[in-house]
Image: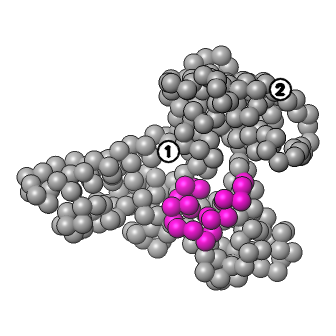
């Protein structure tokens, strides 16, 4: 995929701008607070349907204006496509793909693909598992509509089970409805776990080659998918049974705690450099090299 043009209207501090890109690598340079990061934010918005800097979409609209737009034209397989996002201060954004209105944001994911690397992503190495799960989910959602849908459904089922768990502590009758939500967590969770497992295995091979080039072959990295169910690679059906068994086993303690303590929402990636955990032993230089290797591997 190659960006041909991108147009902004009332986006952040950009009132009106049109940029054209030829082949090759482009460097965007300028003084502080002139809109360099805003351009990257617009490109990422066209790719992921969200900002990487703010969860409030009205903050993306130029001060005093009621709406903003980002229109990106790109080339794929010698064909040009266009994606346009119109942001409104008082209503949900509208997304158009080649002129056709997209009703659900998730249906636009993967139409235009990009990989973002910012200083905040260094937290992926040293931070909590949440950062690493998000990294995985964003990468896989960009290439799998089914994964996007199942991840959404899993989170809904998890929210509902947690709600029932909190109420079941005072009303034991409600505990009888837990198997319904658990069945959904098994169905969606087993698919998510299998996809993550397979993706990490592929990512490991590509990232190792890239890190080897960056480090001059002095250090080796390894990525391992961590879940609560098995140290070995499993099939989707095996994950289903493992998740079901764990949820049934922890049901009583989950009711006491009022939350679901087992599931793919607890997954992690173990990142090793020279056989040691990057989370605890990596230097600042190693953190940057590993993060960059992972981002390039995703690309």
Outermost residue, front side: 64
Along the line of sight, the residue nearer the viewer: 199 or 125: 125
Is residue 180 depicted above or below 212 in this figure?
A: above
Q: Residue at x 54, y 51 (%)?
A: 137
Q: Main secondary structure of the magenta part?
A: helix
N-terminal of the pair, mark 1 or mark 2, is 2
Q: Residue 242: x and y, percent? A: 34, 64
| SS for dot 1 | helix
Q: Give the number of marks.
A: 2
Identify the image quadrant of the N terminus: top right
Q: Residue 61: x and y, percent? A: 64, 30
Is residue 68 depicted above or below 187 in this figure?
A: above
| SS for dot 2 | strand
Instruction: Say if mark 1 contacts mark 2, CB within 8 Å.
Output: no
Along the line of sight, the residue nearer the viewer: 174 or 92: 92
Along the line of sight, the residue nearer the viewer: 90 or 149: 90
Q: Residue at x 66, y 30 (%)?
A: 63
Judge from the rendering whether residue 245 lies leftward or rightward of residue 199; answer left or right. left
Is residue 64 depicted above or below 166 in this figure?
A: above
Q: Residue at x 79, y 64 (%)?
A: 210
Q: Residue 80: x and y, percent? A: 78, 24
Any part of residue 109 in sight: no
Q: Residue 139: x and y, percent? A: 61, 50
Any part of residue 258 in sight: yes
Judge from the rendering whether residue 217 lies leftward or rightward of residue 251; answer left or right. right
Q: How many residues crowd mark 1 within 10 Å: few (<14), some (14–19), many (20+)?
A: some
Q: How many residues crowd mark 2 within 10 Å: few (<14), some (14–19), many (20+)?
A: few
Q: Residue at x 50, y 42 (%)?
A: 148
The region drawn magenta spans 117-136
* Label at residue 18: 2
Query: Based on the displayed image, in which of its 4 quarters is residue 250 positioned?
Result: bottom left
Q: Which residue is disc 1 drawn over?
A: 147
């Amino acid at each position: 995929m190659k960006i041909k043009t991108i147009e902004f209207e009332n986006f952040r501090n950009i009132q009106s701008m049109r940029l054209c890109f030829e082949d090759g690598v482009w460097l965007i340079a300028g003084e502080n607070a002139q809109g360099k990061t805003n351009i990257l934010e617009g490109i990422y918005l066209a790719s992921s349907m969200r900002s990487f800097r703010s969860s409030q979409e009205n903050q993306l609209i130029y001060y005093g204006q009621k709406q903003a737009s980002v229109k990106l034209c790109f080339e794929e397989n010698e064909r040009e496509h266009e994606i346009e996002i119109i942001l409104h201060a008082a209503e949900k954004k509208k997304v158009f793909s080649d002129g056709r209105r997209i009703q659900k944001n998730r249906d636009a994911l993967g139409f235009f693909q990009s990989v973002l690397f910012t200083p905040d992503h260094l937290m992926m190495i040293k931070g909590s598992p949440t950062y690493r799960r998000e990294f995985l989910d964003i990468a896989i959602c960009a290439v799998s509509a089914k994964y996007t849908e199942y991840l959404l459904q899993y989170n809904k089922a998890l929210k509902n089970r947690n709600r029932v768990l909190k109420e079941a502590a005072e009303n034991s009758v409600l505990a009888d409805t837990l198997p319904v939500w658990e069945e959904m967590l098994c169905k969606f969770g087993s698919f998510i776990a299998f996809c993550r497992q397979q993706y990490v295995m592929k990512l490991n091979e590509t990232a190792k080659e890239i890190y080897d080039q960056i480090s001059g072959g002095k250090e080796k990295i390894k990525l391992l998918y961590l879940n609560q169910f098995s140290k070995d690679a499993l099939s989707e059906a095996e994950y289903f049974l493992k998740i079901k068994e764990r949820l049934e086993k922890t049901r009583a303690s989950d009711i006491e705690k009022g939350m679901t303590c087992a599931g793919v929402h607890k997954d992690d990636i173990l990142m090793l450099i020279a056989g040691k955990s990057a989370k605890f032993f990596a230097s600042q230089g190693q953190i940057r090299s590993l993060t960059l290797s992972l981002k390039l591997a995703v690309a």
